[in-house]
Image (tube, grey):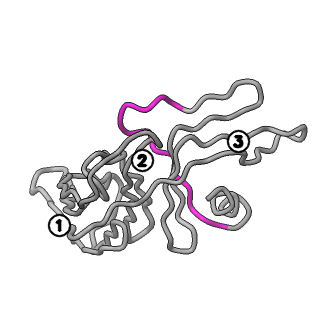
Amino acid sequence: MITQLKLCFLIPCVVTFSSMGTAQPATFQDNIFKIPQGAALVNGELFYYNSIQMAQDEQGRFNLIAAKRSSLVYVDSVSVILTKSLPPLVSLFVRGNKSVPCVELQPPAIFKSSSAFTVALAETSLSPSEMCIQVLAPFETQIPLDITGLDSGTYLVNVNGIESTFTF
């Protein structure tokens, strides 16, 4: 898990650090940069991490020393909701399943390119002492997209591998 995130810092890829939700902001203390949540898009593959720690070396570079990989949720469908307001607003209505009922959805990580939005939607993990019935747990969630500055046209949306499009 750490190797994959480290690769992202060595090869070209897109990284986003989530600031949504109630998570504590990233902190830097005693040459350790602690990032509560982050996501990486590496060669089209999504990764979501929690408790990321990076140590600063003598040259000022950061090296990954810890990260806990989170599981992406199973997405069944993605619908795009486009309002007719001015300015228009775009939201994704996502349906799917969590691996067990005892976990929660984490804040979505949204990657934006010229004609596409890629969304990583992950779930929290159970602690080693927690037990939970092993059944899929359905969920529905709405994810707003920031379309500020986008040109009119057709855009692809991908949430954990399930695609949809919208035109405005």
* Residue stretch in magenta: 12-25
CA distance separating discs 3 and 1: 37 Å
The mark closer to the camera, 1 or 2, is 2
Q: Residue at x 21, y 67 (%)?
A: 78
- 24 falls in the magenta region: yes
The residue type indicated by label 1 comes to Ser
- Asked if residue 20 lies left or right of residue 98, the reply is right
Mark 2 to mark 3 CA distance (whole Å): 21 Å
Q: Position of residue 20 (x, y in %)?
A: 38, 39
The alpha-carbon separation of the residues under discs 1 and 2 comes to 27 Å
Question: Is there CB contact under 8 Å for labels 1 and 2?
Answer: no
Q: Where is residue 145 in the image (x, y as percent from the top left)?
A: 29, 54
Residue type indicated by callout 3: Met
Disc 3 crowd, CA 10 A, few/some/many (<14, 14-19, 20+): some
Q: Position of residue 136 (x, y in %)?
A: 24, 61
Task: Give how far across and how far down residue 132 sits, in percent.
Answer: 30, 48
Mark 3–mark 1 CB contact (< 8 Å): no
Query: Which quadrant, please, contains the N terminus?
Result: bottom right
Q: Which mark is residue 79?
A: 1
The label shown at residue 54 is: 3
Would residue 33 be found to the left or right of residue 20 on screen?
right
- Residue at position x 53%, y 54% in the image: 69
Amino acid type indicated by mark 2? Ser
Disc 3 versus disc 1: nearer the observer: 3
Q: Is residue 160 magenta?
A: no
Report the mark closest to the observer, 2 or 3.
2
Q: Are marks 2 and 3 in contact (CB under 8 Å)?
A: no
| Label number found at residue 125 | 2
Q: Where residue 13 is drawn, which disc sits there?
A: none
Report crowding for label 1: few under 14, some 14 to 19, many 20 or more residues within 10 A (C-alpha).
Answer: some
> Viewed as shown, does residue 90 lie left or right of 107?
left
